[in-house]
Image: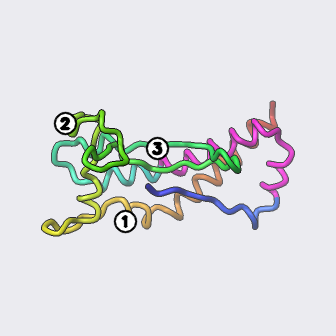
C-alpha cells in the first residue's frame, strides 16, 4: 500500500482557509484532495500492471480512511486480496474469488524462483509530482466550493 501524506507547512493561504472552515467541511476538503491524488496514482498502477487474466487490474482500488487517534485523513492505492495461508488474514475468501488478487506481491517483489516485475513503485515514482499538483488543485477547488455557499 502506498499512502500519500501531504505537508501543508509552507502553504499559509491554504492553512488559513482550512482554519476558517468547520471540522466537517475541513474533513471533506482534505478527503476530496487526497482521494483525487490517489485516483491519479491508481490509474497509473492499472496502466502498468501486468495483464494475464485481468484480475490484478480489476482489484486496484482507492481506499480513504480516517485515523481514529489523531483524525488524519489518508487515501491510498490498495490491491484487493488476502492470502488465506497466512495467519492474520481473512480465511473466508477463496483464492479463486474474482476479488482476491493476493498474488500481486509476488509479481511486484518476485519470489525465489520468479523475478520481480514491479508496477506499483514505478507508478508512484513517475506520477508523484503530478499527483501532488492534482491534490493541491482539488483542494483549492473544494475550498472555493465550500466558501461560496
> Residue 96's mark?
2
Residue at x 24% of width, y 64% of height = 117
- In this rendering, is residue 8 above or below 17? below
Taken as a whole, is the magenta stretch helix, strand or loop? helix
**Percent position (x, y) of residue 56?**
27, 46
Q: Distance between the Cα atoms at labels 1 and 3?
A: 17 Å
**Percent position (x, y) of residue 85?**
25, 48
**Percent position (x, y) of residue 84?**
27, 43
Few, some or many residues within 10 Å of mark 2 (<14, 14–19, 20+): few
> Residue 1's mark?
none
- What kind of element bears circle 2? loop
Q: Distance between the Cα atoms at labels 2 and 3?
A: 22 Å
Quadrant where the N terminus sits is: bottom left
Position of 34 with respect to 114 (left or right) is right
Along the line of sight, the residue nearer the viewer: 16 or 140 = 16
Residue at x 52% of width, y 60% of height = 130
- What kind of element bears circle 1? helix
Residue with the most extreme left position: 113
Few, some or many residues within 10 Å of mark 3 (<14, 14–19, 20+): many
Q: Earlier in the sequence, mark 2 or mark 3?
A: 3
Residue at x 75% of width, y 65% of height = 9
Q: Earlier in the sequence, mark 2 or mark 1?
A: 2
Closer mark to the observer between disc 1 and disc 3? 3
Q: Which residues are magenta?
A: 13-39
Closer mark to the observer between disc 2 and disc 3? 2
To which residue does mark 1 refer? 122
Q: What colour scheme governs how the chains and residues are painted in the rendered image of this protein? A: rainbow
Along the line of sight, the residue nearer the viewer: 22 or 140 = 22
> Residue 62's mark?
3
Position of 88 with respect to 103 (left or right) is right
Position of 27 with respect to 48 (left or right) is right
Q: Distance between the Cα atoms at labels 2 and 1?
A: 28 Å
Amino acid at each position: 500500500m502506498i499512502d500519500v501524506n501531504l505537508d501543508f507547512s509552507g502553504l499559509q493561504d491554504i492553512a488559513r482557509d482550512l482554519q476558517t472552515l468547520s471540522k466537517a467541511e475541513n474533513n471533506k476538503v482534505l478527503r476530496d484532495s487526497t482521494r483525487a491524488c490517489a485516483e491519479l496514482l491508481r490509474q497509473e498502477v492499472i496502466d502498468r500492471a501486468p495483464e494475464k487474466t485481468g484480475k490484478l487490474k480489476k482489484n486496484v482500488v482507492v481506499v480513504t480512511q480516517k485515523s481514529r487517534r489523531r483524525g488524519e485523513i489518508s487515501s491510498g492505492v490498495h490491491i484487493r486480496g488476502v492470502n488465506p495461508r497466512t495467519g492474520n488474514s481473512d480465511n473466508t475468501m477463496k483464492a479463486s474469488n474474482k476479488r482476491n488478487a493476493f498474488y500481486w506481491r509476488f509479481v511486484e517483489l518476485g519470489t525465489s524462483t520468479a523475478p520481480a516485475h514491479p508496477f506499483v513503485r514505478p507508478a508512484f515514482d513517475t506520477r508523484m509530482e503530478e499527483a501532488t499538483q492534482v491534490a493541491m488543485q482539488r483542494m483549492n477547488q473544494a475550498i472555493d466550493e465550500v466558501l461560496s455557499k
